[in-house]
Image (cartoon, grey):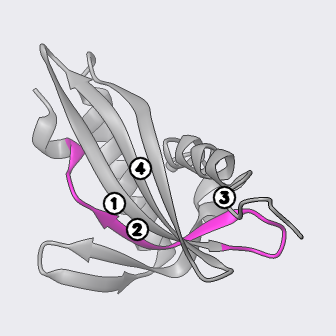
Amino acid sequence: MNTTSPLVGLEQRIVDFAAAWDRLGAPGVGDDLLADPVLVLGEHGTSAVPRQAFLAAVSERYAAVRGATTATATLAGTTPTLLGSRLVLATITWTFGSGAGTALLISDFLLQREDDDRLRCVAYLPRTSVLDHLH
């Protein structure tokens, strides 16, 4: 009888995914992390966004965050929920500090387990926006 939890090892892969997500603007990172297209929750609902358009928007966001020289983000936690054998709903929380204040940034990611065991984002569902917390 196999008593190994299906979450064993998965939690670390989600932490690794979050670390890579934090470098999403770097060349080649998005190709490994994002489906094409990726579903994105926006102000007016969920849309299928081509990977390159999503990466362009991420680059603009990173530029705005880099402009706030005191901004820092630290991974605060992950919560995985298995959805069958190939999909994982991962809630990822970061602590974000800018100026004198801190905030929690929370996003949900629908991640697909690829055959090589890496995780690929098929849907990005942000609950909060880093841009709302820049000072």
What is the three-letter code of the residue carrying label 3? Leu
- Report which residue position mark 3 lands on: 7
Distance CA(mark 3)–CA(mark 4): 15 Å
Q: Disc 2 or 3, which lies upstream in sequence?
A: 3
Which one is in front in this view, the residue at disc 2 or the one at disc 4? 4
Distance CA(mark 1)–CA(mark 4): 20 Å
Which one is in front in this view, the residue at disc 3 or the one at disc 4? 3
Question: Given contact means CB atoms under 8 Å apart, are the residues at marks 2 and 3 in contact?
Answer: no
State which region is magenta: 113-130
Distance CA(mark 2)–CA(mark 1): 5 Å
Question: Given contact means CB atoms under 8 Å apart, are the residues at marks 2 and 1 in contact?
Answer: yes
Distance CA(mark 1)–CA(mark 3): 32 Å
Distance CA(mark 2)–CA(mark 4): 19 Å
Q: Kindly indicate the quadrant of the structure image that contains residue 62.
A: top left
Which one is in front in this view, the residue at disc 1 or the one at disc 4? 4
Left or right relative to 24: residue 61: left
